[in-house]
Amino acid sequence: MPQIPYLDAAQLDRLLDYPSLVDALRDGFAADWTVPVRHHYSIPIKGEPDQTLLLMPAWDAGEAIGMKLATITPGNGARGLPAVNAVYLLVDGPTGQPRALMDGACLTVRRTAAASALAARYLARKNASVMLMVGAGALSRPFIEAHRSQHPITRVMLWARKEEQRAAKAKELNALGLPVEPVADLEQAARAADIITCATLSTTPLIKGAWLRPGTHLDLVGAFTPEMRESDDEAVKRASLFCDTRAGALKEGGDLVIPLKAGIITEAAVKAELAELARGQHKGRASDQEITLFKSVGTAVEDFAAARLAMAKIGHA
């Protein structure tokens, strides 16, 4: 078997520009691909928390097969290693032969940011120009760049709990030419924003519904377990609700799961998922006054679309 290419993070950053990636995700969500439920396995490790093995397959029958293999190893912090590691395998559909391996962590970051930007294409106001980024971790830059690829954003406010963290991240992003300013008052910033993106590990609400002015789009990415949340009940009640997939968001995303269990909303409150938006089955935002909320937990469709785009870019469509 010939040696297959490995696309590292630097190559993927170059190949997966956000305008192209957002369009690829739109086409992927609109397509009739097979995406089984992701597989979770718990692996005990003596003397430390269990490791998690995550498998996320998808395929376009007769064309291509893809799967992301990720491990979450809490004990890696003590080793000075990242807790999450991932690799993506793309396979030729007709023959079943491997075509490429890719850096799964980079692929995940870029496709997650692109999915939020795709949702905002349908759900944010067309003239949205002010963004609030809640969270100053590694995801802040990709989300800012992805949203700026779809909307005329000229001002980005950055909030994090620690002053030194938000100041350092703003300085870093300014050096890259991004119009980012650190802010200390989260409420004031939220009231001024057209698009609010949250990418945190919060277990208590950060964004309150009372702060959302008419026309705001709230993009919730960080709360990826049923116990985590970044918005309060009032935000969920005031907003028109959308998600990447109902199967994932209504089971895993605390921003919807918690109010659902409390009887504050029903599953029918989710107006559409990304596939319905991409296929034109729901138009998205209904007016410039509507408050919209998008909850994302991730799906293998996004990885598969991103991986196939990367291969097409290097001439291996």
Image (cartoon, rainbow, N blue to C red):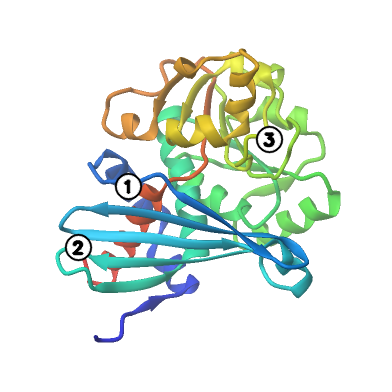
Q: Is residue 299 above or below residue 307?
A: above
* Circle nearer the viewer, 2 or 1: 2
- In this rendering, position of residue 13 left or right of residue 23: right
Residue displayed at 31% across by 80% down: 4
Residue displayed at 39% across by 77% down: 6
Task: Tell me, yes or no, whether the two marked residues, 2 and 1, touch with CB atoms within 8 Å.
Answer: no
Of labels 2 and 3, earlier in sequence is: 2
Residue displayed at 35% across by 46% down: 36
Residue 83, percent across and down? Answer: 66, 63
Task: Tell me, yes or no, whether the two marked residues, 1 and 3, touch with CB atoms within 8 Å.
Answer: no
Which SS class for mark 2?
Answer: loop
Tell me the CA gap for discs 2 and 1. 23 Å
- In this rendering, position of residue 64 left or right of residue 200: left
Tell me the CA gap for discs 2 and 3. 38 Å
Amino acid type at mark 2: Gly
The residue that disc 1 covers is: 23
Label of residue 227 in the image: 3
Which SS class for mark 1?
Answer: helix
The residue that disc 2 covers is: 93
Of labels 2 and 1, earlier in sequence is: 1
Amino acid type at mark 3: Glu
Of labels 1 and 3, earlier in sequence is: 1
Res. 257 in view: yes
- In this rendering, position of residue 245 left or right of residue 282: right
Residue displayed at 67% across by 19% down: 233
Q: Is residue 313 above or below residue 187?
A: below
Tell me the CA gap for discs 1 and 3. 32 Å
**Local crowd at mark 3 within 10 Å, few (<14), some, or many (≥20)?**
some
Looking at the picture, tell me which residue is in the foreground, 153 or 14: 14
